[in-house]
């Protein structure tokens, strides 16, 4: 007789699966997927030349903060038990190429220095590496004659990543979806003595309408065309796996899939097919949809938030970037 099998040839009524759901204590004992505060990464938007926090209508509860507020913001995150932040900089100065993206005292670089000096290694700092916030056209790469020049963009992204490493970041997260960006960034980091700085690659970043609220808060809407020549089509899961494999070959330490909820199948596939940690980015549109429905009284916000983030963990994500990080952490800490 095999352990765990009933030879009686019957299911119900001998087998009653509801026996394992009878009380909260029994359900807790048998819970298979556990969402933890340590799984969460909290995004932070720091904007140059503002003196108070700013909100936007499309992302209630998420703010652009002035540089003077960054210590308070990170302390709030740490007090909730979250140990990682994702820094996005919103510069005052932009131009057609790269603006202030790799300046020694750019908004991200100075923010990293402040956080590192004040908090040391108590917080893991991740910095977004892209050009969309720094360019007047809002695209993620350098535009030449109306087209994104991949190789020029890659060289610039390597400079940006190195400048973040010089400031003290733990990880850089290239999000531009340029071919060869991970290889160029790894080479640039290593040649400048930053072998220990890790790369979280936006390996399968899809051209999604769910980024709209982010573009509002980051002031990064493209001023012409769209991003479909470099971001992925949601119809192509095999291509997504190819992108992931390529980034691994180029030296990525962690791979990312973005958005999260519409791509749980890709998170699952990536988990099965690689030994690298998997990061999922639950994007602004996912957050805004829940907020909007909850605001109309159609759903319970805490319950839907918890179910959504748990499903991302269940699919295989080791790390989750979410605008609900602080709210979810507070709930988990109760």
Image: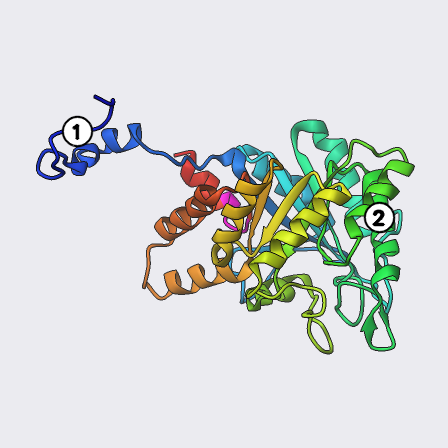
Q: Secondary structure at mark 1?
A: loop
Q: Quadrant of the N terminus?
A: top left
Residue 195: image location, x then y, percent: 82, 32
Q: Quadrant of the C terminus?
A: top left
- Residue 99 visible somewhere in the drawing: no
* Residue drawn 65% across the image and 53% down it: 242
Mark 1, Cα crowd under 10 Å, few <14 / some 14-19 / many 20+, is few
Comparing labels 1 and 2, the label whose residue is closer to the camera: 1
* Residue drawn 32% across the image and 63% down it: 297
Q: For this view, does 35 lie left or right of residue 89?
A: left
In the image, 235 versus 294, the foreground residue is: 235
Residue 324: image location, x then y, percent: 50, 49
Q: For this view, does 311 lie left or right of residue 141?
A: left
Earlier in the chain: of badge 1 and badge 2, it is 1
Vertical arrangement, residue 291 with respect to residue 42, above or below:
below
The colour scheme applied to this rendered structure is: rainbow
Q: Which residues are magenta?
A: 322-326
Residue behind mark 1? 6
* Residue drawn 42% across the image and 36% down it: 332
In the image, 154 versus 130, the foreground residue is: 154
Find residue 313 and name its label.
none
Residue behind mark 2? 184
Dots 1, 2 in contact, CB < 8 A: no
């Amino acid at each position: 007789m095999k352990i765990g099998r009933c030879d009686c040839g019957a299911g119900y009524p001998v087998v009653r699966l509801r026996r394992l759901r009878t009380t909260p204590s029994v359900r807790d004992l048998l819970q298979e997927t556990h969402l933890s505060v340590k799984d969460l990464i909290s995004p932070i938007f720091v904007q140059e030349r503002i003196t108070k926090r700013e909100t936007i209508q499309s992302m209630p509860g998420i703010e652009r903060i002035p540089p003077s507020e960054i210590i308070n913001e990170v302390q709030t995150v740490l007090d909730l038990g979250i140990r990682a932040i994702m820094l996005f900089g919103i510069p005052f100065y932009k131009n057609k190429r790269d603006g202030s993206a790799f300046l020694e005292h750019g908004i991200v670089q100075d923010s990293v220095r402040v956080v590192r000096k004040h908090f040391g290694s108590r917080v893991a700092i991740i910095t977004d590496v892209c050009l969309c916030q720094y360019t007047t056209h809002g695209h993620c790469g350098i535009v030449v004659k109306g087209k994104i020049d991949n190789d020029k963009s890659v060289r610039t992204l390597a400079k940006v990543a190195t400048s973040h490493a010089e400031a003290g970041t733990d990880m850089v997260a290239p999000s531009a979806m340029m071919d060869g960006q991970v290889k160029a960034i790894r080479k640039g980091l290593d040649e400048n003595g930053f072998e220990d700085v890790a790369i979280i690659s936006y390996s399968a970043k899809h051209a999604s309408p769910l980024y709209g609220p982010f573009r509002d808060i980051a002031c990064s809407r493209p001023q012409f065309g769209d991003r479909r020549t470099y971001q992925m089509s949601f119809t192509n899961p095999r291509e997504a796996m190819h992108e992931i494999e390529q980034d691994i070959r180029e030296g990525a330490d962690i791979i990312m899939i973005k958005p999260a909820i519409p791509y749980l199948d890709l998170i699952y596939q990536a988990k099965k097919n690689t030994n690298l940690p998997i990061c999922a980015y639950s994007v602004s549109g996912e957050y805004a949809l829940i907020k909007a429905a909850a605001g109309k009284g159609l759903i319970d916000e805490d319950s839907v938030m918890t179910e959504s983030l748990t499903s991302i963990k269940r699919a295989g994500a080791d790390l989750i970037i979410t605008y609900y990080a602080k709210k979810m952490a507070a709930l988990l800490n109760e």
